[in-house]
Image: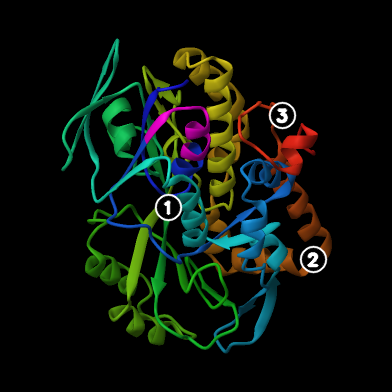
Amino acid sequence: MKNTTVLISGAGIAGPALAHWLHRLGCTVTVVEKASALRPGGQAVDFKGPVHRGVLDRMGLLDDVRARRTGGVDQIIVDGHGRRLAVLPGEFTGGDLEIRRGDLAMLLHERTAHACGYVFGDSVTSLTDTAGGVHVTFERAAPRTFDLVVGADGIHSAVRRLAFGPEEDHVRFLGHYYAIAELGELGEDPVMYNEPGRMAAVGGPKAPAFFVFASDELAYDRDDTARQGEILRSAFRGGGWRLPELMDAVTGAASIHLDSISRVEMDGYAKGRVVLLGDAGYGNTLGGFGTGLAVVGAYVLAGELQAADGDHRTAFRRYEERMRGYAAIARKANAGPFLAPRSRTRIRMRNAMFNSRLLFRLLLKVTDWFATDIDLPDYPLPGLDSPAARSGGFER
């Protein structure tokens, strides 16, 4: 692997996690990111079970993540008068370890920036796979050729589109949208409110203000925050509880991120010298597994490249074989109907589940099973000094 040149598109979680491993293998790594800088703060993400913790430990990140953990916080589900209906327990929403996405991205960047080249404010515009490498053109930078290209650029991956075909061939809309908005200080403990087909939540670390709503598929510019605000206000018009107040605040929001709840459906994760990682290849459906899949996927991809001594065909095949079953949760989950049920009956049924300790414990066991449903090899990746690396193997 020494001197292998690798381009990673995406500086969120999956890309820097892979960069962390590849530079230890002697690769020359470049990470290109469309955004002009790392995105601070944002919603909280979480890790579940010994497999996730074991990979973080091998990366030397576990203690740092623990030091920055937000802590799972119970969220009160209320009716239109603010009266308590049920409790969404913090151990369900926050997993074993919860951390703000921006804090995790910053940790990964700090661990890799000294050894990898980061290029912000640029993006890949074409890929030409040849016998000797992938010729890449960029929106701003000069063209270059890399031995390998990794698409870690999310559910709307440019690398996937260029290498595998249009987004509509690989991304299936699941009937709901979500929005995260910075609305300033709302002065609330974590609360969540539902009406048929829509949900609003404020307070707590998961997001400053979080919205989910059922909808037909919408056409809009994902870079046009004003238009996203209009869509959000329209979706929640005429609502009860504090929805009028929250929608007024959306008008002056510091930031809004609106996106669909969708599923990436791929026959394979690799094509030639190009491979997909994280949401680009097995996009999560807001089910709480995306960050764990990204970090585990980065470990497996790097480990298989090392085991195959840089033979990308063998490594990519083994990576897919190991990850396809584990990533099945992203093909099965759909948080939209859970967070924003389309009828009052379904809202009551969802709430009843959290009011039943038996049903809640069963739900936790199911999520724990998905998070640990992989036999991870003990890849001898270099430069590790952690309890997991010293002991070998992963707890199950």
In the image, residue 106 lies in the stretch drawn in magenta: no
Query: x, y (%) of residue 54?
Result: 70, 42
Q: Which residue is mark 1?
A: 175
The answer to whether 4 appears left or right of 166 in the picture is: right
Query: x, y (%) of residue 148?
Result: 37, 24
Which mark, by number, is residue 375?
A: 3
Near-viewer residue (377 or 326): 377
The amino acid pointed to by label 3 is Asp
Can see residue 45? yes
In the image, residue 23 lies in the stretch drawn in magenta: yes
SS at mark 1 in the image: strand
Label pair 3/2, CB-CB below 8 angstroms = no
Q: Which residue is mark 2?
A: 356
Near-viewer residue (376 or 267): 376
Dot 2 or dot 1, earlier in sequence: 1
Q: Residue at x 43, y 82 (%)?
A: 243
Q: What residue span does the magenta drawing correspond to? A: 19-29
Mark 3 closeness class: few <14, some 14–19, many ≥20 residues within 10 Å: few
Query: x, y (%) of residue 183?
Result: 39, 79
